[in-house]
Image (spheres, rainbow, N blue to C red):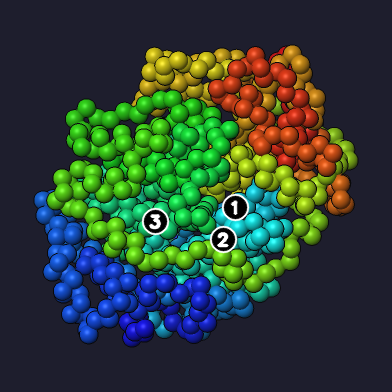
Amino acid sequence: MDDSVSDAHAPTGEMPTILQDDLPLDGSMTTTLSFETGIPPAMMDSNPPNSLTDTLSSFSSTHSSSHGGNNLSTFSSSTTASRRSSMQFTKHVPVRETLNASVVENADGALQLGQYILKGEIGKGAFGKVHLAEDANTYEKYAIKEFSKSKLRKKDKANLFKLGPRGRGRGRRDPEAKAASTSESPLDLIRGEVAILKKLHHPNIVKLYEVLDVANDDSMYMVFEYCEKGVLMPVSLTESYANLFSDAECRDIFQQIVLGIEYLHEHDIIHRDIKPDNLLRSKDSIVKIVDFGVSEMFNKKGDDMTKKSAGSPAFMAPELCRPDHGEVSGRATDVWSMGVTLYCLRYGHLPYISDSIFEMQHIIRESEYKLPEDEDPRFVALIRSLLEKDPSKRATIDQLRDDPWLTNDGKDPLISKEENTTNVVTELTEADLAGAFKKINNLATVVKAIFKLKRGIKSHSPSPSTSSLEIPGADVSEMEKVQDAEEGISNAAHVPVSSENVKEADETQATSDNLEKSIDSVSLEARPEVKEPSDAKETQGTGTSAPLSDSVESEAVKEEPQGYQVCDMESGMCYWVPANSTKPAPTSGETLVADVPEATVKTAEAPVIHVDSTLEVTEQSQTTLAVKEEDVKVTVPTRETPAPRPLSPGPEQMIPSHDRSSSGSTSPGQLLNATPRLVGKLSRERLAMFEQKE
Ligand SMILES: Nc1ncnc2c1ncn2[C@@H]1O[C@H](COP(=O)(O)OP(=O)(O)OP(=O)(O)O)[C@@H](O)[C@H]1O
């Protein structure tokens, strides 16, 4: 190996021992190669060049047209060419893991973490701040993501009652590994992301350099390459982004996204949360795919079938917008999200807009988006092939390679697939996961769980009373068992939809010292009875809680709610709780409210009720968690009543396409059993509301 070629951006300091598993199989550690000329590192391995320059020039001459340079647009010929020359497969530097880091104040009064001088906050993630940092020795800039361990722990607690290997980037593991890890530390939520990022080496994937844990402190850190130009564009549900990209810029950006995703897919990694927010740009305008928090790595080559839903609802593929969706192709869902992203880049707004997750899911499944009449027909064809509702007919990455718009009729082709994907990604192993961080105490042994519900009643005042509460069956091993059964329930994406609900929740959250952003938010919304249009285009309608965008041609007809809808704001998954004559869940007082600390309740008359109270789990035994709280009962399935269905509360109760006549038989018990989540008892006010409605 030629170690003389180094990664100019790699931080200084001792390199850790390189595990076999960290070594790219293709020798990419030896290379600093032009992405434009794209010399495969494998070629370097098999035919070591006499000099790097020789190899570059000879290879370049045979690939001189690989990026065309023929693009007629000013952007492409000037900016793109120079930018591409700086897109490099730099030397693969293994991720360093520092377990006993400290933050100290240096002589200049600045905070310093290891060799990184913290320069200020540049963003906020779900688990903490993002800092701009500078290497004290090289002055190279980095983005350092800070994670609060306590937030992660709380998130993990919430996940105890959810399913499966979920959370931030847990890769799919083999059964043995899964069995071995019956419960995991809060840091496992990041361990999966770190483990995946360790494997990746591509110009369009953000580079993770180091992970630092500060002992006896709440913080841990991930050191990323700095993407100076920030996110591609802000996406809003209410406003259009005015600073639109030109045709050539759009093409250039989308080409880079295609190359990054091709690399991931080729190595059996599904991103699952592609959107402009997760696409940053370096100072050279190189697109960097970030945030592998919900990504998944498949063990079996080509097996991308997943039952998980993840990602932000507005970018979610139609096949994921069904609670009972079963297995779907992860690659196809990424392609859909790429289509939504491209639409945003081109027009500055989303193709499907609603501030209700329910409506969003409905229109994604049933409605069409609008395109300008004078749009380039090549672009129209491309967007249609990406936003194809049938995943089996949706464009594949291979097909995109020859797309006329993307390649500008062949004048601006992509580098070859071989060049793009040569850097081999090795399979994710338990060693990767275990090695990513030092272990901390098993969360399953953590007895005290803080469970908060926000109650800020808009049109109803609370009248608290006190009761002693019990949670039967909150046994972690039992929860593990139901995890698999619950596979169909969505995975928690870390970024909630930017809906009004979320905004309200956020506002309320901001007033609470204790509220933790890290834990999922849940919304309870009134659900209109939906008449499913036989042909979506024939039906005009309004949304449940907000007018839909002009760009949406059809959706549900609104009627008086006959129950309510429970939505996980982060995953976008909703389930329907009927309020019919059988006195279902709400009036029984057994069912509701959330598995997370923050909830809003919507009904037709009282649009939003914030549920706001705090539960403190004070004891745990095999079957019981005792909780003190006002008017709230928290419960999970008991051993005697295992979850009968993989999904809550069963397809016939799931919105929006079920037959309402068949939904009345759902009992609170069924919902409870099928939903191994924390379930709260309704407050008196809330119960009264439902009783009045009946
Ligand atoms: N590598 C980076 N370079 C420059 N800025 C960054 C980088 N990573 C993050 N940021 C900034 O910080 C903001 C928040 O980071 P991030 O996107 O990771 O948060 P998030 O999506 O809420 O993530 P998470 O849920 O993973 O914590 C970004 O919008 C961006 O402005």
Question: Which mark sits nearer the N-terminus, 2 or 1?
Answer: 1
Note whether 336 is above or below 540 in the view shown: below
Query: Mark 3 belongs to which amino acid?
Result: Glu
Question: What's the amino acid at mark 2?
Answer: Gly
Residue position for label 1: 167
Res. 507 image quadrant: top right
Q: Which mark is residue 349?
A: none
Badge 3: residue crowd in 10 Å (few <14, some 14–19, many ≥20)? many
Please say if the residues under marks 2 and 1 sit with CB atoms less than 8 Å apart: yes
The residue tagged 3 is 266
Percent coordinates x, y for residue 406 in the rendering: 23, 46
- Image quadrant in which you'd find residue 466: top right
Looking at this view, is 151 or 476 the one in front? 476
Q: Is residue 381 visible?
A: yes
Q: Is residue 623 above or below residue 660?
A: below
Nearer to us: label 1 or label 3: 3
Work out whether residue 139 or residue 433 is closer to the camera in this orientation and state it.
433
Using the numbered discs, state the Cα–Cα distance from disc 1 to disc 3 in whole angstroms.
23 Å
Q: Residue 526 location, x and y as percent?
A: 61, 24
Q: Which residue bears the numbered disc 2?
A: 192
Give the tally of numbered discs: 3
Residue 364 located left or right of residue 682:
left
Identify which residue is drawn at 17% across, 52% down.
412
| Mark 1 secondary-structure assignment | loop
Residue pictured at 48% horizontal, 50% vertical: 303
